[in-house]
Amino acid sequence: MRQNILITGASSGLGAQMARDFAALGRNLALVARRKDRLEELKAELLQRHPQITVSVGQLDVTDPEAVFTSFRSFATEFAPLGGIDRIIVNAGLGKGQPLGTGRFDANLETARTNFIGGLAQCEAALELFRAQHSGHLVVISSMSALRGMRKNMTTYAASKAGIDALAEGLRVELGSGPIRVSTIRPGYIRSEMNERVKNTPLIVSTEKGVRAMVAAIEKERPTANVPAWPWVPLGLLVRVLPTRALARMG
Ligand SMILES: NC(=O)c1ccc[n+]([C@@H]2O[C@H](COP(=O)([O-])OP(=O)(O)OC[C@H]3O[C@@H](n4cnc5c(N)ncnc54)[C@H](OP(=O)(O)O)[C@@H]3O)[C@@H](O)[C@H]2O)c1
């Protein structure tokens, strides 16, 4: 059982709800994001409901690689008396992006920096800890949009998620069935701050329902999981073989 869990992007949406669900399972938590006030509020809520667990929060911008290393190393030291950090969830992400060539390179660069370069820094820092302790569970929150190229506002986001998805697969290939495990979680549409302005669609599920499926897949340490399984497992198979003209109607 992974007792001490570090979650990035824990100040809202899926990260905050994963923290709630893991706290309910009695796990100790290290939570980071840029909005420290939101993390402090979440910490107070979690400790009120589960006074037996340890919750530590820290401010971190994942686009600053040095800060990522410093933050992860400092949590490793802090949690050493509790047995060390044994699961790291690379969850911080940005859903921004604009069609390429429309003057919004800034938005696309910020998306790529957060999701791919930030994700790479987090995987590096996590693997540094896990290699030193010869164990650990790295969880990368990818997306169903990693499976194919997507149009317009989704183009850079999908490409950044495909990049981090491939990075996690490469690590799984390298680490095989050894003591360091790597899971890739691909959420479908789950309510969060990222999509709060998106209207209800038949495919979108509540934060609670979506995250319950994510946490179940993470606990099973599945190599890959499209969540919730219905409809995203069959849709994942379909999306991989759709002709480009059909993709034009998505996203
Ligand atoms: N919701 C969905 O349907 C869905 C589907 C597929 C994949 N995902 C993925 O799920 C993950 C969580 O997203 P969400 O849906 O929960 O959206 P969200 O509510 O907007 O949460 C995003 C989290 O990432 C953090 N974050 C963003 N930029 C950051 C940075 N530079 N440094 C540190 N933290 C940063 C935010 O915290 P601060 O702003 O406080 O830093 C926030 O806690 C993302 O990787 C997203 O791509 C979501």
Image (tube, rainbow, N blue to C red):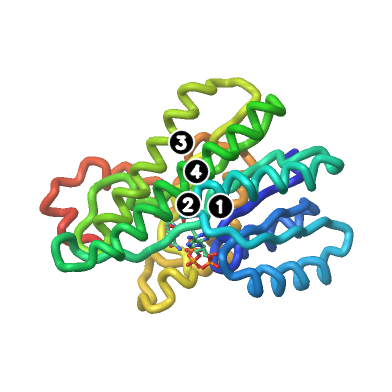
Circles 2 and 1: CB atoms closer than 8 Å: yes
At 46% from the left and 42% from the top, the residue drawn is 120
Marks 1 and 4, how far apart at CA: 23 Å
Specify few, some or many for label 3: CA neighbours under 10 Å numbering under 14, 14-19, or 20 or more. Answer: many
Q: Nearer the viewer, residue 222 or 102?
A: 102
Percent x, y of residue 174: 48, 22
Judged by depth in the image, the label closer to the viewer, 1 or 3, is 3
Q: Nearer the viewer, residue 208 or 114?
A: 114
Q: Which residue is mark 1?
A: 214
Marks 1 and 3, how far apart at CA: 17 Å
Q: Nearer the viewer, residue 86 or 205?
A: 86
Specify few, some or many for label 1: CA neighbours under 10 Å numbering under 14, 14-19, or 20 or more. Answer: many
Label 2 amino acid?
Val
Q: Which residue is mark 2?
A: 227
At 20% from the left and 58% from the top, the residue drawn is 151
- As helix, strand or loop, the secondary structure at mark 1 comes to helix
At 23% from the left and 49% from the top, the residue drawn is 149
Q: Which of pointers 2 and 1 lies earlier in the amino acid sequence?
A: 1
Specify few, some or many for label 4: CA neighbours under 10 Å numbering under 14, 14-19, or 20 or more. Answer: many
Asked if residue 182 is positioned above or below residue 96 in the image, the reply reads above
